[in-house]
Amino acid sequence: MHLKQTVIILFFIALISCLLAFEAGKPFNDPNKPVSIPPSPQRSGDASKGYVYLTTGDYLKSGVPYSYYSFFTPKDRHNYLNRTGKNATVPYDFNVVQSPDKVDVVVPTCLQCHGQVFDGKLIIGLGNTFQDFSNMAKANNPISNFGSNVMQTFSPKQYKAALPLFTSFDAILGDMQTEVRGVNSADRLATLLVAHRNPQTLEWQSKPILDIPKGVIPTDVPAWWLLKKKNAMFYNGFGRGDFGKFLMLSNILTVKDSSEAREVNSHFGDVLAYIKSIEPPKYPKQVDKDLAAEGEEVFVNNCSKCHGTYGANVYYPNLLIPASIIQTDSLLYKGNQQNPQFIVWFNNSWFAKGDYPARLEPFDGYIAPPLDGIWITAPYLHNGSVPTLQALLDSKERPKYWKRNFDKPQYDYEKVGWTYESTDKPKRRIVYNTTLPGYSNEGHTFGDKLTEQERREVIEYLKTL
């Protein structure tokens, strides 16, 4: 064989290999370079209708009968959402809806994770960092307080109305426990629920149809107002396609079948429109404008390549940063979301069908998020392991073990984050232990190269975003 023929054959072999890799969903990107996420078509909707559905809608249709809930649970005194009727008597993160058999039931809502009271005001879209998933054996929200033994006292209609929620809770609550309060186990929740659902019909299966990986991976809930800039959902950017389908995933907690899912899904174009209308709250204290102006220059020169620009020249690059560069805790991108069974289930499920399909595309690394409203989103990194912005920008200040006061929380407006206390040793549930798998505060050390003055300037600028 002539040399020229050999070269041609090798060229075509290489070309075919590349095409096969692309077909298999393995793009030939340099694993050590950031990857740009392309946009996906998204539904439009009515933001005002989305707000109403989010705060009063029946996207979950099974819950605790209101008559039992109101007897055992004190009436909510705040009514942060200014709702009327029975909804005015329950906390902002619950709704009172009618089951298909016209039984009034109390159901959890998206605001369980995506709403938080800050300085006496409810901030819709702010990730809830006060939830307690660290002691699931002891109920930590009003609905979990009702054990299955209580159901024996329900009327037949009440029992039927409560059964889907209690069935899910019995299957998942014991396997969602985190090591410390303040982090979220939503990724674990998705895995557990999917394991009990038929991918096409979404009907409940009493025995898991997927293997469930061990371990609960903690996350810090990202702010909703960032979604308007992003081309992918979740920390490793693997939520592609229709955002509405991902937003309605909580529906599989109680959904009867795919016909019910379609009805709920019909409202989530409106919900997405509302979420995209949310703006981050303004920093409430005085900002040193001169210092912030200096900080903007430092930020543009050192941080904007990944996190974008703000103000008059807004630009967000939607970059996935490889693990080799970001070097933050790897358990999330390696863990439940990289579970091949979970990905196959989702990408062949009802959620991946229809006019607006969704899909999962794993990546070994994390999105560099937009930083709008970053001042209020402490703690930082995808697992909430860093208590303040100052520690985020200076890794030497990151505590190995730390705790904050959940009963009387105080915000540090200078270091920007929750006031915390470093401790000498770990203590489960109340002390964040960064030596545990999934809880590491390593990585994102880009701020270390800045001078102390430059860090002060950047922090002052970040307060303005």
Image (cartoon, rainbow, N blue to C red):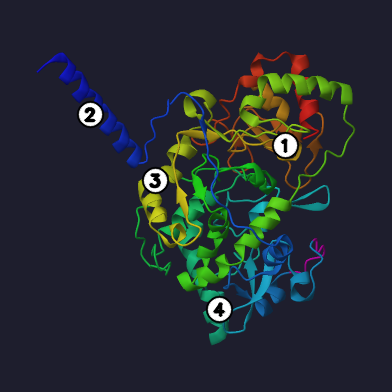
Looking at the rendered image, the disc whose residue lies closer to the viewer, 2 or 4, is 2
Circles 2 and 4, Cβ within 8 Å, touching? The answer is no
Label 2 or label 4, whichever comes before in sequence order? 2
Badge 2 crowding class, 10 Å Cα cut-off, few under 14, some 14 to 19, many 20 or more, is few
On the picture, is 440 further left or further right than 287? Answer: left
The amino acid marked with disc number 3 is Asn
- Marks 4 and 3, Cα distance to the nearest angstrom? 33 Å
Circles 4 and 3, Cβ within 8 Å, touching? The answer is no
- Give the residues drawn in magenta, as a range: 74-80
The residue that disc 1 covers is 374
Q: Which mark is residue 339?
A: 3
361 or 5: nearer the eye?
Answer: 5
The amino acid marked with disc number 4 is Ala
The amino acid marked with disc number 2 is Ile
**Res 161 quadrant in image:** bottom right
Mark 2 element type: helix
Residue 359: percent from left, percent from top: 45, 51
Queried whether the magenta region covers residue 211, the answer comes back as no
- Marks 3 and 2, Cα distance to the nearest angstrom? 31 Å
Circles 1 and 3, Cβ within 8 Å, touching? The answer is no
Residue 281: percent from left, percent from top: 80, 44
What residue is rendered at 44% in x and 60% in y?
Answer: 353
The amino acid marked with disc number 1 is Ile
Badge 1 crowding class, 10 Å Cα cut-off, few under 14, some 14 to 19, many 20 or more, is many
Label 4 or label 3, whichever comes before in sequence order? 4
Looking at the rendered image, the disc whose residue lies closer to the viewer, 1 or 2, is 2
The residue that disc 2 covers is 13
**Res 171 quadrant in image:** bottom left
Asked whether residue 449 appears in the rendered view, the answer is yes
Mark 1 element type: helix
The residue that disc 4 covers is 161
Badge 4 crowding class, 10 Å Cα cut-off, few under 14, some 14 to 19, many 20 or more, is many
